[in-house]
């Protein structure tokens, strides 16, 4: 099958999970990022720009992705005093990005300031609160002095994020079932750190399969190294989308 036929097949067969996917562009230059975008081609329409690429290539790269009609999740994980976070968001939200995030651990006043800043955007991006990073496990939280382990902390922080009026949270797939009783069905649940059973967890700790994530209520998944660093990224992506679709179909 040619690349063109493969991309057409992926885009049509997996349209629902495709729209729920961001590919993490965790590279350090514009050239490398655009090479990934070109390699994945029209099969993929959503990308996540995180700290590495943003510091390597800046808003110019984001503008290029937007100019190609791609959906952009700007994974800034802002965490500062309310005034500073609000100012950063006012600047970021001058661009038609689809989603941006802050750390829930910035606290209620920071979350409210963030919401008010994003509300001024003409583009209405989703504002999401990062709860507990998926790289962190029980032991990490214990040494950090966070009571109760990751699941309890995710529930606590998700309530905080919802009360502040944000659109959703970033959490691991392992907390999704618990969240079903805590937040409304319309609340976004963005899940990074999923892995197929054959894939290495790498620096992630609270991992689960993409099938389980979708079955338990993830609204969007972030797929990173398992796709981008694969020998054949489109085939790797197809495996992830197949698993996500199985999860969606119960
Ligand atoms: O809790 C979090 C929040 C964000 N991320 C980001 O998602 C991707 C995951 O990449 P993989 O290669 O699939 O591990 C990465 O960009 C992180 O910055 C996260 O992993 N966990």
Image (spheres, rainbow, N blue to C red):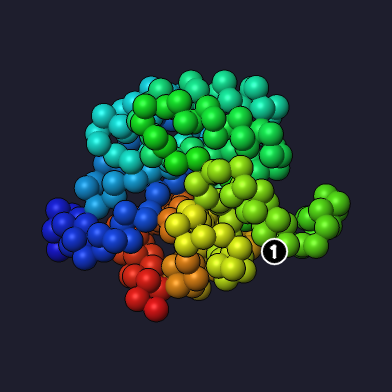
- In the shown orientation, is residue 135 left or right of residue 8? right
Instruction: Name the image quarter holding the N terminus.
Output: bottom left
Q: Can you tell which quarter of the image residue 175 is in?
A: bottom right
Instruction: Return the residue found at the far bottom.
Output: 250
- In the shown orientation, is residue 216 left or right of residue 23? right
Circle 1: element type: helix
Q: Nearer the viewer, residue 183 or 206?
A: 183
Position of residue 13 relative to residue 203, above or below, is: below
Q: Position of residue 95 (x, y in %)?
A: 38, 26
State yes or no: Cβ of the residue under disc 1 lies below 8 Å from any atom of ligand 1.
no
Question: Where does label 1 land, which residue?
Answer: 151
Instruction: Name the image quarter holding the C terminus.
Output: bottom left
Q: Position of residue 168 (x, y in %)?
A: 52, 50
Q: Position of residue 123 (x, y in %)?
A: 36, 31
* Residue at the image point whose x is 37% and y is 56% from the top: 20
Q: Can you tell which quarter of the image residue 63 is in?
A: top left
* Residue at the image point whose x is 38% and y is 39% from the top: 98
Position of residue 3 relative to residue 130, above or below, is: below
Task: Confirm whether residue 77 shows in the render.
Answer: no
- In the shown orientation, is residue 196 left or right of residue 207? left
* Residue at the image point whose x is 70% and y is 42% from the top: 105
* Residue at the image point whose x is 66% and y is 33% from the top: 110
Task: Confirm whether residue 37 shows in the render.
Answer: yes
């Amino acid at each position: 099958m040619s690349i063109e036929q493969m991309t057409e097949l992926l885009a049509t067969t997996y349209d629902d999970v495709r729209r729920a996917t961001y590919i993490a562009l965790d590279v350090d230059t514009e050239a490398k990022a655009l090479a990934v975008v070109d390699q994945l081609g029209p099969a993929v329409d959503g990308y996540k720009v995180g700290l590495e690429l943003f510091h390597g290539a800046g808003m110019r790269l984001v503008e290029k992705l937007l100019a190609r009609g791609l959906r952009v999740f700007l994974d800034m994980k802002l965490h500062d005093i309310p005034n500073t976070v609000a100012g950063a968001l006012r600047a970021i939200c001058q661009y038609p990005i689809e989603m941006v995030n802050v750390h829930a651990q910035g606290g209620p006043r920071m979350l409210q300031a963030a919401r008010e800043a994003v509300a001024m955007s003409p583009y209405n991006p989703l504002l999401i609160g990062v709860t507990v990073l998926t790289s962190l496990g029980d032991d990490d939280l214990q040494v950090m002095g966070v009571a109760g382990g990751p699941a309890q902390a995710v529930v606590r922080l998700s309530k905080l994020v919802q009360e502040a009026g944000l659109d959703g949270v970033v959490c691991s797939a392992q907390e999704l079932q618990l969240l079903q009783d805590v937040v409304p069905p319309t609340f976004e649940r963005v899940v990074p750190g999923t892995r197929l059973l054959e894939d290495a967890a790498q620096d992630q700790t609270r991992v689960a399969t993409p099938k389980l994530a979708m079955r338990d209520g993830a609204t969007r998944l972030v797929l990173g190294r398992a796709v981008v660093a694969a020998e054949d990224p489109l085939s790797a992506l197809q495996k992830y989308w197949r698993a996500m679709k199985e999860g969606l179909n119960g």
